[in-house]
Amino acid sequence: MGARSRWLLLEIVAAVFLFAIISGICATLFVQAKEISEDSANLTMSMVQAQRAAEAFKAADGDTEATAALLGGSTEEDRVTLAFGPDWQPARGEAAYTLAAAIIREGELARAVITVGNETGELYRLDVAHRTGGNP
């Protein structure tokens, strides 16, 4: 084996080694980008569902039962609850995401604290107020 062959072999080994390191870094970055994208999509869907609940709350004039009926959720005292599967479709039973709207009435003012979360915690919160029994 001549001197040229050894240098060529060394260059090839160095190129393969460098390629392996760079591909490992790229794979890590792609995984992180996918996680960030999923988190962003979940935050967007949380905001959409909270806004939907706020609009239903206002349309129901602050009434708990009417709000639950508009959203297709369940009620417990002054609280409306909805469950969503991993694809953000309404779910029965075990849920990946939950929306809870705690409704508080103070005279003509109805307020709702709408929270959307998953098993790790709260994803989004929206506070809404509505004057009941008249003009918005």
Image (cartoon, rainbow, N blue to C red):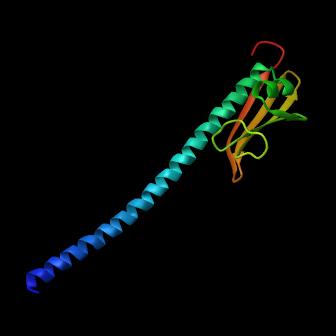
Residue at the bottom extreme, as displayed:
1
Q: If the image is split into quadrants, where does the C terminus sit?
A: top right
Q: Above or below — where is 8 with respect to 112?
A: below
Left or right? Give the position of 95 relative to 133.
Answer: left
Q: If the image is split into quadrants, where does the N terminus sit?
A: bottom left
Q: Above or below — where is 99 with respect to 60?
A: below
Residue at the right extreme, as displayed:
77
Q: Above or below — where is 84 with respect to 5?
A: above
The residue shown at (81%, 25%) is 69
Expressed as whole percent of the image width and height from the top left, the position of residue 27 reads 42, 60
The residue shown at (51%, 47%) is 37
Image quadrant where residue 45 sits: top right
The residue shown at (78%, 32%) is 112
Q: Nearer the viewer, residue 135 or 5?
A: 5
Expressed as whole percent of the image width and height from the top left, the position of residue 9 reads 18, 78
Left or right? Give the position of 107 relative to 52.
Answer: right
Q: Nearer the viewer, residue 127 or 96?
A: 96
Expressed as whole percent of the image width and height from the top left, the position of residue 60 reads 80, 20
Image quadrant where residue 124 sits: top right
Left or right? Give the position of 24 relative to 70.
Answer: left
Expressed as whole percent of the image width and height from the top left, the position of residue 51 reads 67, 30
Residue at the top extreme, as displayed:
135
